[in-house]
Structure formats: structure tokens, C-alpha cells
Image (tube, helix red, strand yellow):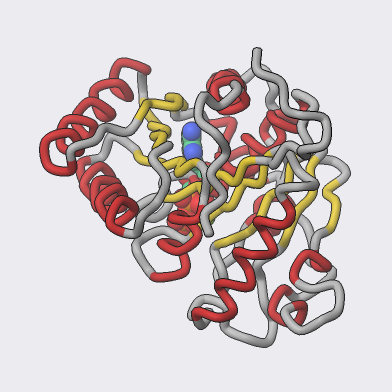
Amino acid sequence: MTRMPADQPKAGKLVAVASGKGGVGKTFLAITLAQALARAGQRVLLFDGDLGLANIDIQLGLVPRRDLAAQFDQPGGILGAIQPCPSCGFDWLPGRSGAVGLAALPEPALAQLLGALRSATSRYDTIIADLAAGIEPPARRLAAAADTLLLVATDDPTSLTDAYAVLKLHAADGGGTDRAVVMNQVQTPAEGRRGFATLARASETFLGFSPRLAGIVRRDPRVRDAIRHQTPLLTRSPQSHAAADILALSATLAAPRSAVARIAG
Ligand SMILES: Nc1ncnc2c1ncn2[C@@H]1O[C@H](COP(=O)(O)OP(=O)(O)OP(=O)(O)O)[C@@H](O)[C@H]1O
Ligand SMILES: [Mg+2]
């Protein structure tokens, strides 16, 4: 195993959870993955990057103490809005704004936000950014700056088509090459593998690269139940299929990277 020199702090990894089509399960996966990594001993920050329509707080029953938009010009900066989620085991950076529409963040503010997230990699092992669905500029910019693009899709043909569009734009935007797909809400693992194979074939043929399969998460009624009770899945239903699938996914993500950390400039 390669050791880092003692004087070189190890930078954490920025993971962007994205999708083409909305409602595929990004927020749920981002939360549960954050909880799984925290349980494995990692220091984890969950950033609600679905700016303006943020809903991590809704799924977890949390109340943001500070408005992200108001933090931009504060001495503590954007990271001053980080607050702990004691029952989750990770920290949380809210994206909700009462005053300013964050959804259409102008480029200088986006760059400031990215700089803040990058600087936070010295404090956290993993930063998970839950992005807005689709291909609007803030989601594209955050995805392109991440070390890992975690693209969530279902085996629905429209979801796969929209996931392909995200891969295409991610490459065009100069995003990193660690592109991983999570097939979510599938009836069986075989269905997930088939859906992934369709996406990977199209990507290989038309884009010249293939993403890797990071994991398959089965459709599970316990997910809806956990969200309704505003409790993380691993707390409420640790024995559920979806919990087991996400724990397996988190082990894949936590594995050491073969490539050197790429913190986009
Ligand atoms: N594995 C699963 N099994 C069953 N239901 C699921 C699963 N994953 C997600 N869901 C359901 O899908 C719904 C949408 O989930 P979520 O809000 O996390 O999606 P999203 O991709 O973040 O949506 P948006 O694009 O609107 O931000 C949730 O209400 C949840 O109940
Ligand atoms: Mg969401």
C-alpha cells in the first residue's frame, strides 16, 4: 500500500450525486450513503446542492440555522453554514435560502461555492453534494468539479436516456473520468444490470468511454417509510434490502482510489 508523506494532508473526496431525470432517488441515496460512510468511521459532509429546491432538510426533519445565501459575504464564509446532524453522524451544509434565489447562482458565486467545498476536503474524508436533476449550469459546474460523478438512474428508458445526456455533458465540461452509475429503484439486481448495460453500451459507442457500475439499489417500501418519518434509512430500517444495497455501495465508494485525487481547478 502506498503511504502519503507525513507532511502532506490527505485530501477528502468530493462526490457529486447527479441525475438527468428528476425523482430517481438522489437525495435519499446521498443521505443514506453519507450515513453509511459515517458509520464506517469517515468524516462526512453532506451538501444540499439542489440550490433553491433543497430538500435534505425535509427528508431528515432538520431546520437550517443559517441561510446559505446570507453566508456568502460573512467572515466565516459559506462553510459557516455547516451544522451537525447528530442523529445522522455527519455534518450538513444546507442549500435552502429564504431570501435569495440560489437556483440561478451567477458564475462568481458558483466559483466561490466550489472553492469553499474544495477547501473543506481538508476537514472531511468525503463530501457528498446532492445536485439538482437535469443539466442546468449549477449542477453541471458542481458535477464537473467533483472527483467522482455518481450518476443515479432507474431502468426506466427516459431515465437512462437522460443519464446518457448527463454523461455527454460531463465529458464536454471537462469533468473527471471517475464516472459511476447507481441503478436505483429496480425490482431485481438483474434488471439493474440490464439497465446499466444499455447505458454503458450507448456511452461506449457514442462517447468513447464507459462509466462503471457503482451499485444497484432495489425498490423497497422501507425507503418511503423512512422519508415519511424523516429518519435516515439505516436508523429506521437497517435490515431492509435498500439499506443492505447502500451499505455495499458505500464499501465500493470508500475503497482506495487508484488514481491521484483530482480537485478540479
Ligand atoms: N430504492 C427505493 N425504493 C423505493 N422508493 C424509492 C427508492 N429510492 C427513492 N425512492 C422514492 O423516490 C422518491 C424520490 O426520491 P428523492 O427525493 O430522493 O429523489 P431525487 O432524485 O432527489 O428527486 P429530485 O430530482 O426531485 O431532487 C422518494 O419519495 C422515495 O420514496
Ligand atoms: Mg433531490
Q: Quadrant of residue 124?
A: top right
Residue name at image x 80 percent, y 26 percent: 41
Q: Quadrant of residue 210?
A: top left
| Residue 235: percent from left, percent from top | 76, 30
Residue name at image x 36 percent, y 24 percent: 187
**Of residues 256 and 18, the one drawn nearer to the viewer in this rendering:** 256
Tally of numbered tags: 0
Which corner quadrant holds the N terminus?
top right
In the image, is residue 40 above or below residue 79?
A: above
Image-based side of 214 in relation to 77, left or right: left
Q: Is residue 82 visible?
A: yes
Residue name at image x 86 percent, y 78 percent: 75
**Of residues 30 and 114, the one drawn nearer to the viewer in this rendering:** 114
Residue name at image x 28 percent, y 57 percent: 172
Q: Quadrant of residue 61?
A: bottom right
| Residue 257: percent from left, percent from top | 55, 27
Image-based side of 178 in relation to 126, left or right: left
| Residue 63: percent from left, percent from top | 80, 64
Instruction: Return the residue found at the far left.
Output: 205
In the image, is residue 147 above or below residue 77?
A: above
**Of residues 207 and 20, the one drawn nearer to the viewer in this rendering:** 207
